[in-house]
Image (cartoon, rainbow, N blue to C red):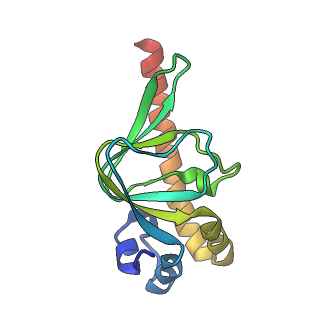
Amino acid sequence: MVPADTLRKLDLFDGLSARELEKLEGISELVDYPRGAFIFTENEEARKLYVMLEGKVAIQFETARHQEAVVHIASSGEAFGWSAMVQPYRFTASARTVEDSRVVTVDGENLRMFLKDDCHIGFVIMEKLAQVISNRLRETRLQLISCVHG
């Protein structure tokens, strides 16, 4: 369980009331990952949403030439693993720690239920996740252009 005071500091939950944050305490937990650990891999079932507390995580995918293409480095406060909130609930990239990292994990299925039950929580979180998805799309596009044009 992650205390509401910790959740309050994270951009993904900015705009939620103390009562709303308390609802999320029970579906979140703190997890430590050592440097080089895979948090999840591309095409794996997406069961959790992640938010960085400390450390750095590379969001990457494998190219047709079997090379890793890093599209983003997530750092403190950033959300990743948005696939847990969007059908078909499969990760579109992998997440590997670049350094020792502490991450807040949020159970995707329970969070989706909260979003359906409380329109304000749903709007705030999905608006922020839409920004994350938009940024990743832009970063992936830039990575693709770089791969094509050397």
Q: Position of residue 94 (x, y in %)?
A: 50, 40
Q: Front-most of 78 and 62?
A: 62
In the foreground, 131 or 40: 40
- Residue drawn at x 67%, y 71% as measured from the top left: 113
Q: Quadrant of the N terminus?
A: bottom left
Against 57, residue 9 (above or below) is below
Residue visible at 45% across and 69% down?
Answer: 29
Residue 69 at x, y percent in the picture: 44, 28
Looking at the image, residue 107 lies above or below residue 16: above
Count of number-bearing discs: 0
Q: Please say if 40 is above or below 11.
A: above
Q: Residue at x 40, y 39 (%)?
A: 72
Instruction: Give the residue at the far bottom of this rendering.
Output: 19
Residue sticking out furthest to the right: 88
Residue 11: horizontal and vertical position, in percent? 39, 64
Q: Position of residue 48 (x, y in %)?
A: 55, 58
Q: Left of 7 or right of it: where is 128?
A: right
